[in-house]
Image (cartoon, rainbow, N blue to C red):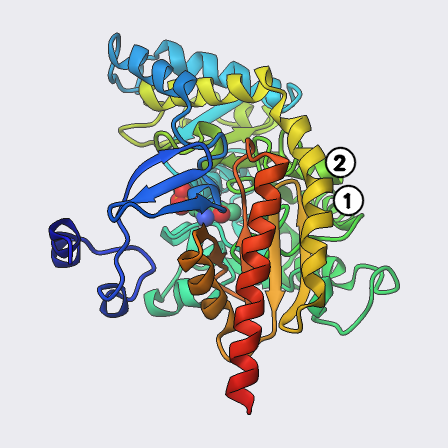
Amino acid sequence: MNKNLLKDIDRVWHPYVQMEAYKEKPTMIVEADGIYVKDIRGKTYIDGISSLWNVCLGHNNKKVINSITEQLNSLQYFSLYGYTNQPSVELSLMISDITDNRYKRFFFTNSGSEAADSAIKIIRQYFKNKGEANRTKIVSLEKSFHGVTYGAISAGGIPIDSQQYKPVLSGFIKIPPPYCFRCYYNKKYPECNLACGNKLEEVIIQENPETVAAFMAEPILGAGGIIIPPKGYFTRLKEICDKYGVKLIIDEVSTGFGRLGTGLGIDNWNVKPQIFIGAKGISSGYLPLGVVGVEEDIYEAFLGDKKQLNHGFTTSGHPVSCKAGIATLRVIKEENLIKKVKDKEVFFRKQLQQLMNISIVKDIRGMGLMWGIELIDKYDVATLTYEIAKRKGLITFITDASNVIALFPPFITTEEQLVRIKEVMEASLKLAEERVKIMLK
Ligand code: PMP
């Protein structure tokens, strides 16, 4: 085996990976350009998931690289504790712009998990500052994913993320997700009358409304299996929240900044949360960056004696990361990528639907450039398909909670390349189907 790979196995502990199995097949990526990445053995892959739906602009974007380099040549770092820097100011204005000026106040973090924990701390302190100290509880969705820090796993609803790390924080309550394909109530939309959404009201009343601070959710549950809430879902939930003075926190880490063909993913449901969190696509993954955006009423509650937010990271508002964010949002605007993602949704949907006639495929769903292929829940077909696709030169992702293969191509993926992704998926799924048939003989 290559010397570098041996050193990797010897020293590096990889996230969410069984190292015992990993050491049989390490893959070191050494170069990347556009939608393609190359490993140390010289094999090229299509990055079908934008490297964990992070590198939304694709790899090796010179505009982003040049902006970062320019910033490194002027100010590399200075903290935001009592000082400021030009990139964090400019980026804040650009985030206001991409969110139609609904948000004017931004708190910067280094990751989505940190943004989730920051939002939880902000909302708890908000109510304390307002004289409602008992409002501490957070309601969220089973199968949701908000990151890996303690606040995030307390809100998250995927058991493997928290099981081994208990006790998690107190004051977190889960309700069923809007998983129409496998409805928790065995009902059909719209006759269900949004039973899963109405559960929020039941829980708020049961807990005592004066103790509930926020409802937190992703617009589309990503790690939970690309679960897309039906029309009207978030409108109903926002109505319930407003009725009881509960705030809505939307996690846009995987869906924000163009991934769903809109500024924020939640725009597809026409609902305005009081708080949103973002990361990943905001800087196209070129440097770590996360953000919490809040409405004015939340921000204003922190003004005044003994009300300041006693929370922050050394690298909050890091100028070089913020510069990566500025360059990313500029490219998105200049190249009209949000509109292009919406157009590609229509094209990709038609392509992927052709896979529905493969017997191991149960459902195909998506929005923008965030797609999931749900497979039969047997024989570990998702892992099998993932391995075959990788061998054929396509990197995909198996979501944590379900038998769903995810595809999140970069925004710059051409129609021709989307067809290629479909073709590799088709060949991989058919091979997996064959293997299952042989197994069953
Ligand atoms: N929220 C969502 C919806 C995510 O998809 C992720 C990452 N997959 C996170 C939060 C956590 O982000 P990070 O890995 O940057 O901490």
Is residue 164 depicted above or below 371 in this figure? below
**Total numbered labels:** 2
Judged left or right of residue 134, residue 12 is left
Judged left or right of residue 160, residue 420 is right
Q: In which quarter of the image is residue 10?
A: bottom left
At label 1, the amino acid type is: Thr
Residue at image x 55%, y 76%? 434
Q: Where is residue 117 in the image (x, y as percent from the top left)?
A: 42, 44
Residue at image x 50%, y 60%? 399
Foreground of the two, 271 or 220? 220
Which mark, by number, is residue 379? none
Q: Are marks 1 and 2 in contact (CB under 8 Å)?
A: yes
Chain-order first, disc 1 or disc 2: 1
Residue at image x 42%, y 24%? 61
Q: Mark 1 points at which residue?
A: 235
Q: What element carries label 1?
A: helix
At label 2, the amino acid type is: Asn
